Image: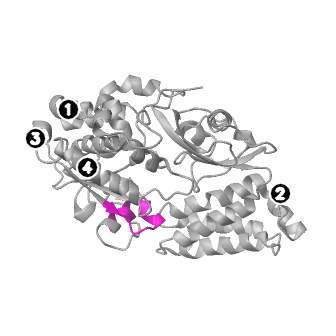
Amino acid sequence: MTYPQVLLQNRKPDRIATLEEYQQSGGYQALKDVLHKHPYKDVQEILIEAVLLGRGGAAFPAGMKLRTVAEDAPFPRYMVCNADEMEPGTFKDRVLIHADPHMIIEGMIIDGYGALAEKGIIFIRPEYESAARILEREINIAKEAGFLGKNILGSEFSMDIVVHRSGGRYICGEVTAQLNALMGKRPNPQQPPPYPTEKGLWGMPTVLQNVETLANIPHIIRNGVEWYKNLAKTETGAGTKLFCVSGRVNKPGCFELPMGVRLSEIIEVHAGGMPPGSEYKACLPGGASTRYLPEEFYDIEMDFDPMREAGHRLGTGAIMVFDQKTCLVGATLNLTEFFARESCGWCTPCREGLPYIRDLLLRLEEGEGREEFIPMLEQMSKHLWSSYCAFAPGATSPVESLITYFEDEIREHVSQKKCPFK
């Protein structure tokens, strides 16, 4: 079963798409159209009408974010592309950059025009050095071609883009922490108001969008709102989605599929099914900070609204598949160790609560668990929702869903005084 490829249409097995190849597929036509045919506010309205939701995990409407920049807001205004892809299991942004970097660059320029932001910054994780070099090279090529710099394509709009390498902490992916990191401050999150679109980098209006979100923008402008909505399988959805599939599947990888495609189809068809002897037990549907999806949700539509109605989140669309041989207590311990290490340490619930949960899970896994650990895990998970930002509630999502759906597995660790899967 094949679907139209939009974001990955120029993907090649061994190299990136060149500027010429991107232009042959319609690249930079959308930029020409908006700069010469549309006032900047049209970009906001088109993205709102297209129901383009942020693909970085939060699903905030991209057009609404632009609209929150006040018309009389001061200059300079900043456009930040969040390529700090450190969510475990997520690698879609890296795939996009290595496939078609000019799609992201064009999306940034159009989004920047939608806020009249003349300064663009790509914030990228340090492990993505090859992607950072690709972006730096292609930004220079775009500038030489007249798509960046002063008076782009003869218009009154000017914009430049630079690449900034992160210091390498997961918390830097949080919007306000990322802005602090860019300003050379400790990357602690800040509680709005003011919001970044009012006072962001150096006190100036700043719009921050995810790589995949930006890559959608040129296609929406060029092909229209109805075309974009019709790409989805669900009525509430719009566009396509990049799904990163890993774990117990025969064909792990990054797949561009219609928004609303069923989880079962992603695993069985596009990811090649599960290995012989493996049976589906659960998955994390949107990265490490989402809840386990047990077998009862195996056929769920992978779209923001259906997932929300089922009490889950689509997140980044990074699907980690576990089979019946996998210890989910051990898997949750592994995730919790990551989050405990990556906490910025700013607030008490997160700083103290995550190591506490990690210790309880470790003792369960090593056969030292007790029955009362289960309500203790529940209570501590609730405390983490009192933290300063969304980091801790995301970190506790696997823990909460482990108790909800797999409490029997926890009890087996207690009764057998060991991990039953070892």
Q: Residues within 10 Å of mark 2 (few under 14, many from 20)?
A: few
Marks 1 and 3, how far apart in space? 12 Å
Mark 4 and mark 3 residues within 8 Å of each other at the beta carbon:
no
Q: Quadrant of residue 203?
A: bottom left
Residue lying at the far right of the rendered structure: 416
Q: 231 or 160, which is in the foreground?
A: 160
x then y, percent, for residue 93 = 44, 48
Report the residue marked by disc 3: 156
Q: Circle 3 sits in a helix, a strand or a loop, which is it? A: loop
x then y, percent, for residue 245 = 60, 45
Amino acid at the residue labelled 2: Asp
Q: Which mark is residue 139?
A: 4
Q: Name the N-terminal-most of marks 4 and 2.
A: 4
Q: 338 or 147, which is in the foreground?
A: 147
- Marks 1 and 2: which is nearer the front? 1
Tell me which segment is drawn in magenta: 164-180
Q: Name the N-terminal-most of marks 1 and 2.
A: 1
Q: Circle 2 sits in a helix, a strand or a loop, which is it? A: helix
Q: Name the N-terminal-most of marks 1 and 3.
A: 1
Amino acid at the residue labelled 3: Glu
Q: Which mark is residue 148?
A: none
Residue lying at the far front of the rendered structure: 14
Report the residue marked by disc 2: 408
Q: Circle 1 sits in a helix, a strand or a loop, which is it? A: helix
Q: 275 or 212, which is in the foreground?
A: 275
Left-right relation of 305 to 362: left
Report the residue marked by disc 1: 32
Residue 176 located within the stretch drawn in magenta: yes
Q: Residue at x 24, y 55 (%)?
A: 205
Q: Name the N-terminal-most of marks 4 and 3.
A: 4
